[in-house]
């Protein structure tokens, strides 16, 4: 027993789950196999204290939590609960092989009812195997799984000398040497075993995370970033030494910003998804921003808000020489420089600066903002209901849920169900972003009114002026082309980030290669979307980094979001030839945007809404507090 335990990798997983590794490489076994001797993972639900003793004897595992699980009578469709005590003589122990060489079987165990457990299988091939391996094949336990490639098992990473175990359920991670081979036999005894923390047994550190929560000391990362940004003030335009310093800070800031979210994150990863998404987005944004600041030919000038035809707006025009010279010669004090730098750091769309786009100012009243908030919340409420109903449904898929409601089965039901779920996910994503920004605008409006009431300096009041917070979205569902969707319908917060990171460099390279104006425009579009793809894949690498229970690993994880954004420029290029072919009675360009968007967004949705990913941040729909819907 002691010798076996010393060679066995053991861990404390989620309640009632026993996981062990057998590396005898005996090949795949089917339903009527003898006791297991194969290269695969074994996940066993604890059904009886005797199994706890069995796991200790066979695996050297003494860290199991007992969880009652009644045996089944018949197959899964006719399972019935047994409340009487389970005798080991009539007990059936089922294990699910999860990994087998380069081809394996996934068996993701999900609760269907409090006393029934089902299996969610991902199908790549048509080969169907039985997923249980008791010593003798009993008829009381029937499950099936389907073969998939091991590359599609996101909770398993194979290193040359170690196995990195990601346990679904409680986000525990352990790295340990591969153990020796085992032989599985059914439990025969019922002896209590004292639970043991595997961190103590394996001498692991108290935290297996590769990142740690950020503290006040991380403000030191802002020092070179703030310094580089401040050197773009017009008053420093004639200093060549400061220009060299600004460029010298570029690689330093780029590296620090890109690496920061990997060093510091909010834990636990599964429960702090939104916080880590913001952290990763800021890391990428400021990394590209450091390139923008470092390679800028000159300073950033401020521009004024104009009133044209009774509409307040910013125009993207070249400032006159007199305006530039006045800003360069204007003496600046420390407080003014700090205000200018802070405004530059927080102005993601650059409305008050010369590099910003042409845009209308925010003219929404407080009542208009509340109306917009509740309107998008209502749409998000409906989308969230659909998504969480599917996530928490015993049917495990929208198709099965629709069939259970009486919807007749038809050949295109699968496509309809997936498109509907993708649409709901897109609505939820857009409404969440819009609602949060509208809430921010409401708070900024209240702060601005309070500062004016307190008669504070104009510079401070101007920083909270709601005029600089126009809505992020402009009815993207009404777009008549993909170009309109991405340039005006969807939010443009990261527009300059994608242009600086890939759009403009691609255009410059095409021009240098002798490409015409149209080729330069196409290259710029492709470059911008390539940067967008990198941005979203970067977020996945940060937010779902090891030890997340469903990590995103480069290069083995499927880049679903990256593929989605890489397809967009090709849709923009070909749409002038396709939209005229669609009758206006069918929607014309709108129909094209909807079809192309729903088809290509499937990979994006699948990657962000997988197990323990973005949707895991939501509790069951019935347990979401009312303030989530009513309070901005």
Image: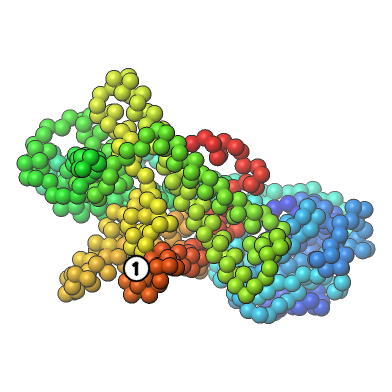
Residue 327, percent from left and from top: 12, 38
Question: Residue 489, located in which quarter of the rendered image?
Answer: bottom left
Residue 597, percent from left and from top: 45, 64
Which residue is rendered at x = 51% and y = 44% of the image?
Answer: 377
Residue 112, percent from left and from top: 74, 57
- Relative side of 304 to 147, left or right: left
Residue 353, percent from left and from top: 22, 44
Outermost residue on the top side: it is 454
* The N terminus: image quadrant: bottom right
Residue located beneath label 1 in the image: 572
> Is 404 drawn above or below residue 201 in the view shown?
below
> Is 143 drawn above or below residue 430 in the view shown?
below
> Is 123 drawn above or below residue 369 in the view shown?
below
Viewer-proximal residue, 562 or 246? 562
The reply to whether residue 234 is visible in this rendering is yes
- Relative side of 560 to 391, left or right: left
Which residue is rendered at x = 70% and y = 48% of the image?
Answer: 197
The reply to whether residue 37 is visible in this rendering is no
Secondary structure of the residue carrying numbered label 1? helix
Which residue is rendered at x = 24% and y = 29% of the image?
Answer: 459
């Amino acid at each position: 027993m002691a010798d076996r335990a010393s060679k066995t990798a053991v861990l404390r997983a989620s309640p009632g789950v026993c996981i062990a590794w057998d590396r005898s490489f005996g090949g795949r076994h089917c339903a009527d196999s003898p006791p297991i001797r194969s290269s695969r993972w074994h996940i066993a639900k604890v059904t009886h204290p005797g199994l706890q003793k069995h796991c200790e004897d066979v695996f050297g595992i003494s860290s199991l939590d007992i969880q009652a699980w009644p045996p089944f009578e018949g197959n899964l469709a006719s399972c019935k609960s047994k409340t009487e005590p389970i005798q080991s003589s009539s007990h059936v122990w089922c294990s699910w092989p999860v990994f087998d060489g380069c081809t394996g079987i996934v068996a993701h165990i999900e609760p269907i009812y409090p006393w029934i457990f089902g299996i969610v299988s991902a199908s790549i091939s048509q080969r169907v195997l039985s997923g249980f391996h008791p010593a003798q094949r009993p008829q009381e336990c029937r499950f099936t799984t389907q073969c998939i490639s091991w590359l599609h098992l996101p909770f398993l990473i194979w290193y040359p000398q170690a196995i990195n175990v990601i346990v679904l359920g409680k986000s525990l991670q352990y790295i340990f040497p591969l153990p020796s081979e085992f032989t599985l036999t059914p439990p025969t005894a019922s002896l209590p075993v004292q639970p043991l923390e595997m961190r103590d047994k394996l001498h692991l550190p108290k935290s297996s995370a590769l990142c740690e929560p950020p503290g006040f000391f991380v403000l030191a990362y802002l020092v070179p970033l703030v310094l580089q940004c401040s050197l773009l003030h017009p008053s420093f335009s004639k200093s060549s030494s400061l220009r060299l310093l600004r460029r010298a800070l570029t690689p330093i800031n780029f590296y620090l910003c890109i690496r920061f979210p990997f060093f510091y994150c909010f834990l636990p990863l599964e429960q702090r998804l939104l916080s880590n998404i913001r952290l990763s987005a800021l890391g990428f944004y400021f990394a590209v921003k450091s390139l923008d600041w470092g390679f800028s030919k000159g300073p950033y000038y401020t521009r004024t808000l104009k009133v044209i035809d009774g509409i307040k707006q910013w125009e993207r025009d070249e400032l006159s020489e007199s305006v530039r010279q006045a800003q360069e010669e204007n003496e600046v004090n420390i407080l003014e420089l700090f205000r200018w730098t802070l405004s530059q750091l927080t102005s993601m769309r650059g409305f008050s600066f010369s590099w910003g786009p042409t845009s209308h100012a925010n003219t929404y009243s407080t009542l208009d903002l509340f109306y917009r908030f509740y309107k998008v919340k209502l749409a998000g409420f409906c989308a969230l209901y659909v998504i969480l109903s599917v996530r928490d449904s015993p049917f495990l898929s929208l198709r099965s849920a629709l069939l259970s409601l009486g919807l007749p089965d038809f050949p295109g039901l699968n496509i309809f169900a997936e498109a509907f779920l993708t649409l709901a996910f897109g609505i939820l994503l857009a409404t969440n972003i819009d609602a949060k920004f509208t809430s921010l605008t409401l708070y900024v409006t209240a702060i601005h009114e309070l500062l004016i009431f307190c008669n504070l300096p104009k510079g401070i009041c101007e920083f909270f002026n709601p005029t600089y917070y126009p809505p992020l979205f402009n009815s993207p569902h009404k777009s008549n082309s993909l170009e309109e969707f991405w340039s005006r319908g969807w939010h443009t917060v990261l527009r300059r980030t994608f242009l600086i990171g890939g759009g403009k460099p691609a255009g410059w390279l095409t021009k240098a290669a002798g490409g015409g104006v149209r080729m330069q425009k196409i290259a710029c579009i492709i470059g911008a979307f390539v940067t967008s793809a990198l941005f979203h894949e970067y977020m996945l690498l940060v937010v779902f980094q090891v030890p997340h229970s469903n990590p995103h690993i480069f290069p083995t994880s499927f880049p679903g979001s990256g593929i989605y954004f890489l397809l967009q420029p090709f849709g923009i290029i070909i749409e002038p030839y396709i939209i005229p072919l669609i009758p206006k009675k069918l929607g014309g360009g709108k129909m094209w945007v909807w079809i192309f968007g729903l088809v290509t967004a499937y990979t994006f949705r699948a990657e962000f809404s997988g197990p323990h990913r973005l949707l895991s941040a939501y509790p069951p729909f019935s347990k979401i507090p009312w303030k989530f819907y009513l309070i901005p």
